[in-house]
Amino acid sequence: MCETYPFGVDPAWHGTCSELPFLNSLKMKMSILLGVAQMNLGIILSFFNAKFFGSSLNIWCQFVPQMIFLNGLFGYLSLLIVVKWWTGSKADLYHIMIYMFLSP
Protein backbone atom coordinates (compact mmCIF):
# COMPACT_ATOMS: atom_id res chain seq x y z
CA MET A 1 0.00 0.00 0.00
CA CYS A 2 1.40 3.36 -1.07
CA GLU A 3 0.57 6.33 1.12
CA THR A 4 1.29 9.93 0.23
CA TYR A 5 2.80 12.33 2.72
CA PRO A 6 1.08 15.71 2.97
CA PHE A 7 4.10 17.17 4.77
CA GLY A 8 7.72 16.11 4.72
CA VAL A 9 9.71 13.79 2.48
CA ASP A 10 8.42 10.36 1.61
CA PRO A 11 10.77 7.67 3.03
CA ALA A 12 10.49 5.84 -0.29
CA TRP A 13 13.15 8.24 -1.63
CA HIS A 14 15.74 6.75 0.75
CA GLY A 15 18.25 4.65 -1.14
CA THR A 16 17.02 5.44 -4.65
CA CYS A 17 19.44 6.61 -7.33
CA SER A 18 17.59 9.94 -7.63
CA GLU A 19 17.50 10.66 -3.89
CA LEU A 20 20.39 13.14 -3.90
CA PRO A 21 19.20 15.31 -6.84
CA PHE A 22 15.66 15.34 -5.47
CA LEU A 23 16.69 16.33 -1.95
CA ASN A 24 19.18 18.95 -3.19
CA SER A 25 16.49 20.50 -5.37
CA LEU A 26 14.02 20.48 -2.48
CA LYS A 27 16.52 22.07 -0.09
CA MET A 28 17.45 24.75 -2.64
CA LYS A 29 13.80 25.69 -3.20
CA MET A 30 13.07 25.78 0.54
CA SER A 31 16.13 27.98 1.04
CA ILE A 32 14.88 30.42 -1.59
CA LEU A 33 11.46 30.63 0.05
CA LEU A 34 12.93 31.15 3.52
CA GLY A 35 15.47 33.71 2.27
CA VAL A 36 12.85 35.75 0.41
CA ALA A 37 10.59 35.72 3.47
CA GLN A 38 13.48 36.89 5.66
CA MET A 39 14.45 39.67 3.25
CA ASN A 40 10.82 40.83 3.06
CA LEU A 41 10.69 40.93 6.86
CA GLY A 42 13.85 43.06 6.96
CA ILE A 43 12.49 45.51 4.41
CA ILE A 44 9.16 45.74 6.25
CA LEU A 45 11.04 46.47 9.48
CA SER A 46 12.93 49.25 7.68
CA PHE A 47 9.54 50.74 6.76
CA PHE A 48 8.49 50.83 10.42
CA ASN A 49 11.88 52.29 11.33
CA ALA A 50 11.51 55.07 8.75
CA LYS A 51 7.93 55.70 9.87
CA PHE A 52 9.03 55.91 13.52
CA PHE A 53 11.69 58.51 12.67
CA GLY A 54 9.33 60.36 10.31
CA SER A 55 11.51 59.93 7.24
CA SER A 56 9.20 59.91 4.23
CA LEU A 57 12.26 60.12 1.96
CA ASN A 58 13.42 56.68 3.16
CA ILE A 59 9.95 55.25 2.63
CA TRP A 60 9.60 56.48 -0.96
CA CYS A 61 13.23 56.24 -2.11
CA GLN A 62 14.32 53.12 -0.22
CA PHE A 63 11.41 50.98 0.99
CA VAL A 64 9.21 51.15 -2.12
CA PRO A 65 11.99 50.41 -4.69
CA GLN A 66 13.35 47.58 -2.54
CA MET A 67 9.92 45.94 -2.25
CA ILE A 68 9.27 46.30 -5.98
CA PHE A 69 12.66 44.87 -6.95
CA LEU A 70 12.68 42.03 -4.41
CA ASN A 71 9.14 40.85 -4.99
CA GLY A 72 9.21 41.53 -8.73
CA LEU A 73 12.06 39.06 -9.15
CA PHE A 74 12.32 36.76 -6.18
CA GLY A 75 8.70 37.02 -5.08
CA TYR A 76 7.72 35.86 -8.57
CA LEU A 77 10.23 33.01 -8.32
CA SER A 78 8.80 32.03 -4.92
CA LEU A 79 5.30 32.07 -6.36
CA LEU A 80 6.46 29.83 -9.21
CA ILE A 81 8.03 27.38 -6.75
CA VAL A 82 4.85 27.12 -4.68
CA VAL A 83 2.64 26.75 -7.78
CA LYS A 84 4.98 24.07 -9.13
CA TRP A 85 4.72 22.14 -5.85
CA TRP A 86 0.92 22.41 -5.72
CA THR A 87 0.26 21.49 -9.35
CA GLY A 88 3.05 18.97 -9.88
CA SER A 89 4.17 20.88 -12.98
CA LYS A 90 7.36 19.90 -14.79
CA ALA A 91 8.19 23.52 -15.70
CA ASP A 92 11.85 24.48 -15.59
CA LEU A 93 12.16 27.49 -13.29
CA TYR A 94 15.66 28.38 -14.50
CA HIS A 95 14.53 28.93 -18.06
CA ILE A 96 11.43 30.84 -16.97
CA MET A 97 13.57 33.33 -15.02
CA ILE A 98 16.17 33.62 -17.81
CA TYR A 99 13.60 34.22 -20.52
CA MET A 100 11.89 36.79 -18.32
CA PHE A 101 14.96 38.99 -18.88
CA LEU A 102 15.77 37.96 -22.44
CA SER A 103 12.26 38.53 -23.82
CA PRO A 104 10.31 40.80 -21.48
Image (tube, rainbow, N blue to C red):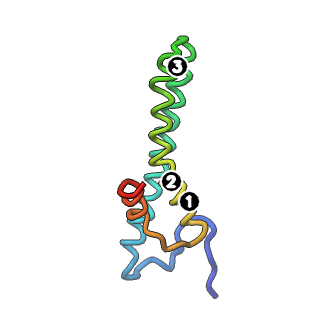
Q: Residue at the far top: name it.
A: 54
The CA distance from mark 3 to mark 1 is 31 Å
Instruction: Say which residue appears at 50% left-offset and 52% top-offset.
Output: 76
Q: Residue at the far bottom: name it.
A: 1
Instruction: Say which residue appears at 53% left-offset and 16% top-offset.
Output: 56
| 103 or 9: nearer the viewer | 103
Report the residue marked by disc 3.
49
Q: In this view, does 35 lie above or below 67?
A: below
Under tag 2, what secondary structure?
A: helix
| 50 or 42: nearer the viewer | 50
Q: Are marks 1 and 2 in contact (CB under 8 Å)?
A: yes
Sequence-earlier tag: 3 or 1: 3
The kind of residue on which mark 3 rests is Asn
| 14 or 29: nearer the viewer | 29
Q: Where is residue 19 in the image (x, y as percent from the top left)?
A: 40, 75
Instruction: Say which residue appears at 57% left-offset and 14% top-offset.
Output: 52
Report the residue marked by disc 1.
82
The kind of residue on which mark 2 rests is Ser
Q: Where is residue 11 in the image (x, y as percent from the top left)?
A: 51, 75
Q: How crowded is mark 1: few (under 14 residues within 10 Å), some or many (20 or more)?
A: some
Report the residue marked by disc 2.
78
